[in-house]
Amino acid sequence: MHANTAADPSFGCDPLSALFEEVASARAAMTVARRAPLGTSSVVDVARTRLLVALEAFTAELDARNLPVPYGIRDDLRIQRRTLGKFSGSSS
């Protein structure tokens, strides 16, 4: 058995890891969108929706694995849901 490396096809294929990478990427996109000029709220809305989808997918995978949802993820999910007016779903 060999160590996981970038050359190993199974390296980085964990769905949880990929979902977390999307959360991190969506958060970065949200940071960029917040710096957009005034009057470009659609840019922020798109980034916020992407972040919400990423957070929901990540927390769903954590729930499926019976893993706890980190406080920061849970709080960010609640903020994004309320900001977008989406109150449905679990209170993860």
Image (cartoon, rainbow, N blue to C red):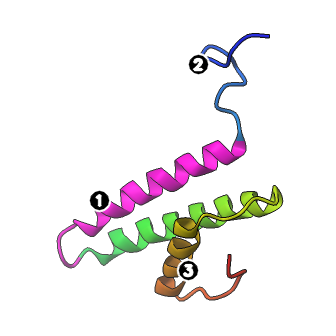
Q: Report x, y in % for residue 72.
A: 52, 67
Kind of element beneath mark 2:
loop
19, 3: nearer the viewer? 3
Labelled pair 1, 2 in contact (Cβ < 8 Å): no
Residue with the mark numbered 2: 6
Which residue is at the far left? 37
What residue appears at the point 63 percent right and 43 percent down from the top-left corner? 17
Pair 1/3: label in front:
3
Q: Which residues are magenta?
A: 15-39
In this figure, what is the number of numbered marks? 3
Q: Is residue 8 magenta?
A: no
Task: Classify mark 2: residues with Cα within 10 Å, few (<14), some (14-19) or many (20+).
Answer: few
Which secondary structure, mark 1? Answer: helix
Disc sitting over residue 32 in the figure: 1
Mark sitting earlier along the chain (1/2): 2
Crowd class of label 1 (few under 14; some 14 to 19; many from 20; radius 10 Å): few
Q: Amino acid at mark 1?
A: Val
Residue type indicated by callout 2: Ala
> Disc number at residue 78?
3
Whole-angstrom CA distance, mark 2 to mark 3, is 35 Å
The spot of residue 5 in percent (x, y) is 61, 17
Up/down of 33 relative to 41, above or below = above
Describe residue 44's horizontal placement relative to residue 71 as left or right: left
Alpha-carbon distance for marks 1 and 2? 29 Å
